[in-house]
């Protein structure tokens, strides 16, 4: 596994090479700043790629920023989970809308050496997408 350290706002076309992007809860210290990061990801993520977001619900929003659903227009929100135990963060699983005509397979040339999880994203791969979380306790919104 190779770790890269960068400000996510400086990472652009390389994001297309990833099937799944996990965004830590404190990337964006408030709702508006978090929204800017999510819109940046929406711009550069591969169509069909999954974005795993940490959010907060209820009083937990005093501790962590909430993901504003209005910044997820370019995503299909697959599931939202609000824990009811001592776990603080909610999880929002969303998928960048498919736009097959815009898939640029040549973007692979932008992949940095040693990047982790090189994408095998293809439009047809996602036709049979099944949420791996189907068997877990879920609260959908
Ligand atoms: C509280 S830690 C996350 C811990 C753990 N990964 C989690 O999600 O629970 C927040 C992380 O977000 C990273 N981070 C904050 N702003 C960032 C940015 N603009 N670009 C890249 N990483 C950022 C920080 O470096 C830090 O590692």
Image (cartoon, helix red, strand yellow):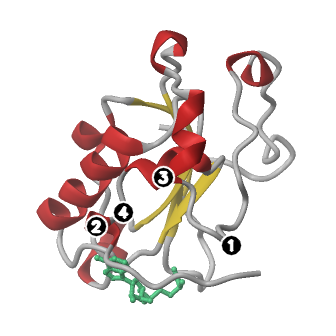
* Kind of element beneath mark 3: helix
Of 61 and 114, which appears nearest the observer?
Answer: 114
Are circles 3 and 2 on residues that touch, CB within 8 Å? no
Mark sitting on residue 11: 4
Name the image quarter holding residue 105: top right
Q: Nearer the viewer, mark 1 or mark 4?
A: 1
Identify residue for label 2: 10
- Where does the image place residue 88, in percent across and percent down from the top left? 50, 80
Nearest the viewer among 111 and 44 is 111
- Kindly indicate whether the residue at mark 4 contacts the one at mark 3 (C-beta within 8 angstroms): yes
Within 10 angstroms of label 2, few (less than 14), some, or many (20 or more) residues? Answer: few
Q: CA distance from mark 3 to mark 4?
A: 7 Å
Considering the numbered disc 4 on the image, is that residue within a helix, a strand or a loop?
Answer: loop
Residue 104: percent from left, percent from top: 51, 26
Q: Is residue 24 left or right of residue 113?
A: left
Q: CA distance from mark 4 to mark 2?
A: 4 Å
Question: At x 41% / y 75%, what residue is drawn?
Answer: 25
Residue most toward the left? 32
Which numbered disc, 3 or 1, marks the residue that appears first in the sequence? Answer: 3
Percent from the top left, x then y, of residue 83? 59, 67
């Amino acid at each position: 596994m190779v770790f890269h350290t960068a400000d996510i706002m400086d990472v652009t076309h390389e994001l297309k090479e990833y099937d799944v992007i996990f965004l830590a809860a404190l990337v964006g210290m408030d709702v508006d700043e978090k929204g800017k990061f999510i819109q940046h990801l929406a711009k550069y993520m591969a169509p069909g790629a999954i974005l795993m977001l940490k959010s907060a619900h209820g009083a937990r929003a005093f501790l962590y920023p909430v993901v504003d659903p209005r910044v997820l227009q370019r995503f299909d929100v697959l599931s939202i989970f609000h824990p009811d135990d001592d776990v603080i963060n909610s999880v929002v699983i969303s998928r960048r809308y498919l736009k097959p005509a815009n898939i640029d397979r040549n973007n692979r040339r932008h992949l940095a050496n040693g990047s982790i999880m090189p994408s095998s994203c293809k439009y047809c791969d996602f036709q049979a997408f099944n949420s791996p979380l189907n068997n877990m306790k879920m609260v959908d919104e």
